[in-house]
Image (cartoon, rainbow, N blue to C red):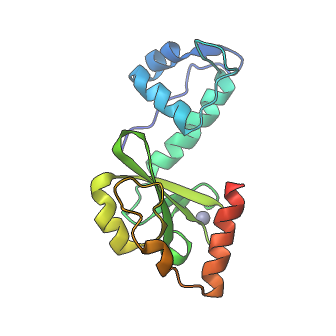
Amino acid sequence: MAKAYSVRGLCYYICYSAEDLATHFGVHIQTVREWVRKGLSPIDNNKPALFMGAAVIQFINALNDQRKIATAFNEFYCVSCHHAHTPGQNTIELKQDSGGFIRATGVCSKSGIRIHKCYKMEDLPQLRKKFTVVDTLRLYGSGNSTLNTHISHSPQQTDFMEQMTHEHA
Ligand SMILES: [Zn+2]
């Protein structure tokens, strides 16, 4: 699997620029920007962005944990269970992400938290085969088909939908 990033040498109380981090981890600056999109927060909204060492260390440790675990096509890494498993009800919501990716979101049936995974556009047919897709509204070119009207209203399904809605609020 992918190599782990080493946080050795980073200081909790030092602020780093994106360039500093790119140099430290030996990655492209674009990768650092991707980390920001994934949840690495700068200390404020000023430009250029600065990152507190403590936040970087925490983020990278979590990232390493995720990368360590190889997920099967239909498994999502769950931060609550600390391992990969399939989404509850085998049901996912799809959303078009930037750069031609699809962001799939499901719910962990044990903890109720949302679990995410990115797929490529070409994975779409496979996703539809493997999962019950409940929301493709924001997926361009999917024609928003009739998928949404096919959701069976079993009590379990309703629970799931409610969870999803609450999380949106
Ligand atoms: Zn879980």
Q: Quadrant of residue 10?
A: top right
Residue 2 placement (x, y as % from top left): 37, 42
Give residue 115's quadrant in the image: bottom right
- 87 is higher (above) or lower (below) than 118: below
Please give the name of the residue rendered at 59% of the width and 37% of the height, measured from the top-left corner.
Answer: 39
Viewer-closest of 45 and 82: 45
Q: Nearer the viewer, residue 148 or 35?
A: 148
Compared with residue 18, is residue 154 higher up or lower down, i.e. above or below? below
Q: Does residue 59 lie above or below 78 as drawn?
A: above
Percent coordinates x, y for residue 74 in the rendering: 40, 66
Image-based side of 136 in relation to 141, left or right? right
Residue 127: x %, y % from top left: 36, 66
Can you give x and y, in whole percent of width and height, for residue 84 in the image?
50, 62
Which residue occupies 50% across, 48% down?
A: 66
Point 31% across, 53% down: residue: 121
- Is any part of residue 93 visible from this angle? yes
Q: Is residue 21 above or below residue 86?
A: above
- Quarter of the image where the C terminus is located: bottom right
Q: Residue furthest left?
A: 122
Q: Quadrant of ligand 1?
A: bottom right
User: In the drawing, does residue 139 fall left or right of residue 154?
Assistant: left
Total residue callouts: 0
Q: Quadrant of residue 4?
A: top left
Residue at 49% x, 77% y is: 149
Residue 86: tell me if it is visible: no
In the shown orientation, is residue 153 left or right of residue 24? right
